[in-house]
Image (tube, rainbow, N blue to C red):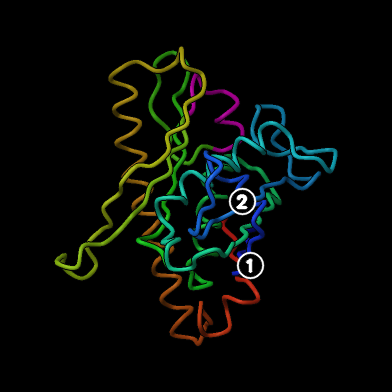
Amino acid sequence: MAAAYGPREADRSSLLASSSSSSFSSEGRITVDLRSAPFSGGSANGTLGGRTRPAQTVAERAAAASLAAALGPLVLSSQFPKLVVDVCVVVLEDGGSALAAAALAAGAALADAGVPMSGVLGAAAVARARGGGPIVLDPSAEEEAAAAARCELLAVCSSSSSASPGAPSTATITQVCFSGGGGWTADGTEAAVAAGAAAAGAAADAVRGALKRSREEGGGGWGGGGGAGGARAAME
């Protein structure tokens, strides 16, 4: 489950802390907080779930950083200068491919809130079976545990204005997170990225369709009531 809150005024100290230099930045920014419910499961194979204490785990902090890095090129932060939009993600159940699901939910929540964006965030998870087995898209927790290697791919997905209606999105990859490096060959890596990019584009198209239906039903937005109080999205 993901929620987007804001925009809110950013204090000077927080803007300085987010900058790589000591100069004050007038750009808006996105913060990401990702945590897992204690009952979410998934800790056995090193994924996000299974948190037993309130503090963020190393895996949760790494996932939040990946989401923030992926959302950076997507959000048009110059359109809300000196303001902050907070994205909160809670993993209720980790049945596999948790980071990809969290990314889709976070991107959908921002879009539903009407935050200015250059496209829709797409995401996909890929696993490779042991012994040179086939590539598996959207692996379950059991498939992740049995995999020789895993990959999570996040991408900014946009539709060209010249494309025909219903044409699939074009994915620009922003983050690729590999694990189990010994299980990836050069050809396998290329195939995994290609399959993941296609799946991320398809997922982004599904999110775009859901957002369109929501707005046709009277959903809010940045200037229409949905942005100020926050917007929530849940992805299975």
Q: Which residue is drawn at 38% across and 42% down?
A: 174
Left or right of 93 in this view: 79: left
Image quadrant where residue 120 sits: bottom left
Estimate the x, y position of residue 200 in percent, counting from the top left: 38, 48
Q: Residue at x 36, y 60 (%)?
A: 119
Quarter of the picture holding the N terminus: bottom right
Q: Which residue is drawn at 69% across and 52% down?
A: 90
Q: Residue 9 carries which label?
A: 1
Residue denoted by label 2: 32
Estimate the x, y position of residue 131 in percent, counting from the top left: 44, 13
In the image, 36 versus 235, the foreground residue is 36
Q: What stretch is highlighted in magenta?
A: 140-150
Question: Could you say whether the residue bearing mark 1 is in a helix, strand or loop?
Answer: strand
Q: Residue at x 31, y 46 (%)?
A: 172
Magenta stretch contains residue 63: no
Residue type at numbered disc 2: Val
